[in-house]
Amino acid sequence: MSTQQPENTAPADRKVILVTGASSGIGAAIAARLVTEGHLVVAGARRTDRLRELATSTTEEAARSGGALEPVRLDVTDRADVAAFVQGARDRHGRVDVLINNAGVMPLSRLDSLLVDEWDRMIDVNVRGLLHGIAAALPVFTAQGSGHLVTVASIGAHEVVPTAAVYCGTKYAAWAITEGLRQEVDPSIRVTTISPGVVDSELAHTITEAGAAEAMRSYRAHAMGPDAIAAAVSYALAQPADIDVNEIVVRPARQR
């Protein structure tokens, strides 16, 4: 029996792809799928132990596909940290083809609960984190004459429900910022918004208000897996350079 190791079979269209919030949930699913498709994924998050576990879990698939996963500590609320995340990837690999702005938090609560610190956290991660990513990646994409920015927004960018006013506000903002970017940039730079419905992830674990937590348990009764969102991202990235997938809304069939 041959003991020869699998050859590196990286595809000719292998991309250098940066993913924020990659330590769990949607971000981890996106990173893992893109590795299996042969891409070099730079996975950023604060929980580096989770990133290392993700890198280990994708080792076998990476060997088959020619992909790779590179864990990097990242705090998207720190502008300098995001700039270093993008520039470091460019310095190491010569280019950055895609930035997937996925990092997000969702501590839902009624407005009259006045959980202002939690509101600030959502604004810092969901809005400022996105802007930091754009500020870091756009000059790189412009200099290269190519690039693809993907924002993971939410169905909350299209509707508002009780306890979600601030969260939906941040996701409306993320949608608007990304759509504005799409209209402003040169056609050589593609811009996509992915708006997930209810997904089985850790986002709901950050809810501290009892009423909001209970409502979320009912809301998530028919959640979909994060792989559905990873598939949507994969589809958008795989289109020819002259095709720009502007937005994909993905939700469970039971979420009407």
Image (tube, rainbow, N blue to C red):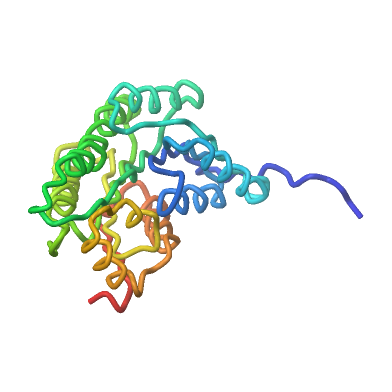
Residue 86: horizontal and vertical position, in percent?
A: 38, 28
Residue at 40%, 27% (x, y): give it: 85
Q: Is residue 249 above or below residue 233?
A: below
- Image label count: 0
Q: Is residue 46 above or below residue 238?
A: above
Q: Quadrant location of residue 144?
A: top left
Residue 23 shown left or right of residue 105 in the figure: right
Residue 117: horizontal and vertical position, in percent?
A: 19, 39
Q: Between residues 19 and 53, which one lies in front from this camera angle?
A: 53
Residue 61 shown left or right of residue 156 in the figure: right
Residue at 52%, 50% (x, y): give it: 32
Residue 233 shown left or right of residue 117 in the figure: right
Which quadrant holds the C terminus? bottom left
Residue 102: horizontal and vertical position, in percent?
A: 34, 46
Residue at 33%, 24% (x, y): give it: 83
Which quadrant holds the N terminus? bottom right
Q: Is residue 39 above or below residue 228?
A: above
Q: Quadrant location of residue 232?
A: bottom left
